[in-house]
Amino acid sequence: MSEDLKGKVALVTGASSGIGEATARTLAARGAKVALVARRVERLEKIASEIAAQGHTALAIEADITDQQQAIGTVERTVDDLGRLDILVNNAGVMLLGSVAASPTEEWDRMIDINLKGLLYMTHAATPHLLAGVEDSPRGATDLVNISSVAGRTASAGAGVYNLTKFGVGALSEAMRQELSRKGVRITIIEPGAVSTELVDHLRPEVRESVRERFDDIKTLEAQDIADAIEYAVTRPAHVSVNEILIRPTAQR
Ligand SMILES: NC(=O)c1ccc[n+]([C@@H]2O[C@H](COP(=O)([O-])OP(=O)(O)OC[C@H]3O[C@@H](n4cnc5c(N)ncnc54)[C@H](OP(=O)(O)O)[C@@H]3O)[C@@H](O)[C@H]2O)c1
């Protein structure tokens, strides 16, 4: 049975585009009040006002979550303005592909800063609220959803440092599942294959071309396909914890 999210508050990082935007819209449509976090605040405000126009509650929060104080501030602002925190979707991330030998190390720093440290800062700031939320939750469970990737399950040439970050997200999620499962906080890891978003726009041109060629002849996933998977996980009854969803385009090898 699927349950609605009325009375719940969700915070989605990386909500200015792609999977995060689709997730924020979807959770709001299911009744959650939603905080949208990213750096491009004009986009967040536009999305939040569209959500509000549908009769739901959305709060745009500008933040660079690689800065721990800003990450903490997003959680505080959410709890202050929306009253509580029941669902954290750690979605913000970058995928700067390239062979280890040929990649500028600045790209590694960016991936480690957002995919790992940003996710950790958000998780650390949010966990006390997720634990508190279990006590007075409308449904007796709260949710931490981490967006990993197929690249968090299978390493491949040209993706080594991205693999490193996403394998790390998988390891952290399992450890936290063991730490928090008895306390009512559910941990879900989502592992998408190729999704049509802005993610590839940040690649160096030669790398971008090779990624586009690889997926040129297949129908990739839409951001909504991943939002649907997240919606499924967070609307299960309290005794059901969806630990992992691996979701590829049908034609992806
Ligand atoms: N697309 C795929 O094929 C695919 C496959 C597997 C996994 N994923 C994962 O899905 C997640 C979302 O990616 P997407 O595909 O939706 O790409 P996207 O459209 O590029 O979204 C990335 C989001 O992260 C935000 N972000 C980046 N750096 C940030 C920072 N320092 N502070 C706050 N927000 C930041 C961006 O917002 P601002 O720039 O406005 O800050 C943006 O909203 C990522 O973790 C990615 O690794 C994607």
Image (cartoon, rainbow, N blue to C red):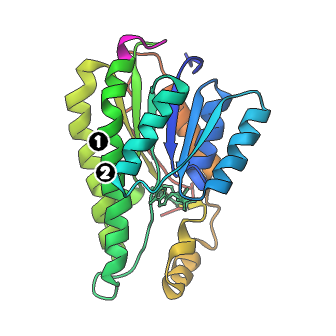
Apparent side of residue 45 relative to residue 2 in the rendered image (left or right): right
Label 1: which secondary element: helix
Image quadrant occupied by the N terminus: top right
Answer yes or no: is residue 58 visible. Answer: yes
Residue 90, x across and y down, in percent: 43, 45
Label 2: which secondary element: helix
Q: Quadrant of residue 26?
A: top right
Q: Are marks 1 and 2 in contact (CB under 8 Å)?
A: yes
Q: Residue at x 55, y 33 (%)?
A: 231
Q: Which residues are magenta?
A: 134-138
Query: 225 or 51, which is in the foreground?
Result: 51
Q: Residue at x 36, y 66 (%)?
A: 111
In the rendered structure, find residue 169 and report the number of the disc placed on it. 2
Mark 2: amino acid: Val
Q: Residue at x 52, y 76 (%)?
A: 211
Apparent side of residue 187 relative to residue 50 in the rendered image (left or right): left
Residue corresponding to mark 1: 173
Residue 44, x across and y down, in percent: 64, 50
Query: 204 or 71, which is in the foreground?
Result: 71
Residue 119, x across and y down, in percent: 35, 50
Mark 1: amino acid: Ser
Is the magenta region chiefly helix, strand or loop? loop
Q: Most extreme residue toward the right, as rendered?
A: 53
Residue 207, x across and y down, in percent: 48, 83
Q: Residue at x 29, y 81 (%)?
A: 100
Q: Quadrant of residue 48?
A: top right
Residue 154 is a magenta residue: no
